[in-house]
Image (cartoon, coloured by chain):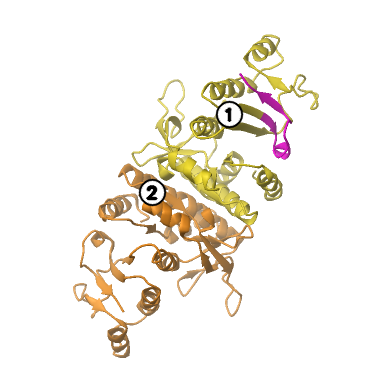
Chain colours: A yellow, B orange
């Protein structure tokens, strides 16, 4: 999403998805690049960004401003009635600053409450929310929250109002049987197959929490989860489809 | 609005204004400060910012992200259901890049169209829009638009739906008879008195376009315009009240 040309292609594909939709974006690469220009070092632990006060300013600017508003403007050019939001807007997603244990993640928020009613209303009117990975604590503080989490929590909250498919886009066509073979996409996954493939060592690493989150979303009423490559989002039956 | 402490006071005052409301903010000082940290020079002509591509990135981040989202989070902490928007969101305000004449302002947008229907709907539901001084051209480009202009155009567009008072907050208690005497506030202005005071040299400089804009808003259905100091916004009958 962070290169103008690939963003353009992705938004054109996204615009083709029929029905109501919501887009959740990240922006980590741009945040790192801007932080560097400002002389602020990016520190990551297990792929999670340590967010001190300076870094919080950077992600507020980059996620909430630069990335979000360029996506919104890009979608509007495609006649998609986009509305950019953080969790502070409409008090959509309230979080609490993560307690400090072994690691102090700083201004990182764990989601506590999702208020999706107004959002569901807007979606039913044809508005397409574009969600930045920022939440707030309802005490005036913005917090950095992982985009996958925002997507999962949004899917769960909207399942009260709509039949929801949660799609995760990444650089592969889906969950692979053989990570060296891009064509070895596992078409269907359910908890049983998942556990078998984890036991066999076929599914491993960062894919495990992603899939565990997917099962949690399904248990909360999301109809299906699809993991696919971003240029395939407009097509049905691509990638890995996950159901209970 | 750009110092945490004064912002807090202003938002507390704003929260006390009864009835439906919209907040329009700027962010020029923060934009200049961030641009400087990034090694980008701020160029101003007659108080207007020359917005080249790098500066457009800065104002998108600062106005659309940093300033807007901190105001939204601050208002949510006061139980004001704020929703931060640029002109791209909901296709709320479409503009065109200012034609290059003597001065090339760069990515600065002149307002062409305001779509206030969804906004009016949200306001009637208790949502408080917080508008950043950014518009879009509906071709995927964000543009920098003066906050006073956003406020005036918003007041005019909402006059179709509500009885609108347009308030301009600045550092004085109102329009002054004697600029050296902060207490010499002109309580009431109309086009006749305005022309007389301009002819007498009492009203001059940057106040003239501000007041001309005010009369234009009034002609388009806005009920009254108030010019006052930001700590007085919660009080009735302060500052200068302008009617036709």
Q: How many marks?
A: 2
Residue range corresponding to the magenta coloring: A227-244
Q: Residue B82 carries which label?
A: 2
**For residue A194: magenta?**
no
Q: How crowded is mark 2: few (under 14 residues within 10 Å), some or many (20 or more)?
A: many
* Figure check: A23 above or below B241: above
Horizontally, residue A36 falls left or right of residue B48, namely: right
Of A90 and A17, nearer the camera is A17
The secondary element bearing badge 1 is classed as loop
Location of residue A90 with respect to B110 vertically, above or below:
above
**From mark 2 to mark 1, how far is it between C-alphas?**
32 Å
Residue A148 quadrant = top right
Of residues A55 and A233, the one nearer the viewer is A233
Q: Position of residue A142 (x, y in %)?
A: 42, 40
State the residue position of label 1.
Answer: A47
Can residue A64 be spotted in the picture?
no
Identify the residue at image location x=43%, y=45%. A89
């Amino acid at each position: 999403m962070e290169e103008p040309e690939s963003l353009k292609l992705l938004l054109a594909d996204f615009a083709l998805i029929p029905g109501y939709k919501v887009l959740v974006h990240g922006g980590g690469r741009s945040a790192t690049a801007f932080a560097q220009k400002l002389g602020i070092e990016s520190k990551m632990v297990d792929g999670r960004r340590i967010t001190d006060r300076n870094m919080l300013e950077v992600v507020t600017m980059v996620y909430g401003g630069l990335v979000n508003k360029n996506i919104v403007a890009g979608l509007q050019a495609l006649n998609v009635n986009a509305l950019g939001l953080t969790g502070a807007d409409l008090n959509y997603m309230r979080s609490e600053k993560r307690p400090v244990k072994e690691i102090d993640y700083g201004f990182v928020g764990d989601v506590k409450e999702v208020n999706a009613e107004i959002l569901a209303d807007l979606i039913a009117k044809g508005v397409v929310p574009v969600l930045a990975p920022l939440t707030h604590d309802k005490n005036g503080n913005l917090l950095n929250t992982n985009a996958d989490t925002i997507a999962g929590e949004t899917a769960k909250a909207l399942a009260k109002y709509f039949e929801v498919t949660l799609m995760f886009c990444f650089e592969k066509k889906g969950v692979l049987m053989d990570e060296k073979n891009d064509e070895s996409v596992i078409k269907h996954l359910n908890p049983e197959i998942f556990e078998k493939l984890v036991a066999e060592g076929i599914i491993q690493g960062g894919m495990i929490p992603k899939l565990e989150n997917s099962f949690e979303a399904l248990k909360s009423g999301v109809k299906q989860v699809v993991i696919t490559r971003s240029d395939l989002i407009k097509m049905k039956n691509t990638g890995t489809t996950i159901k209970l």
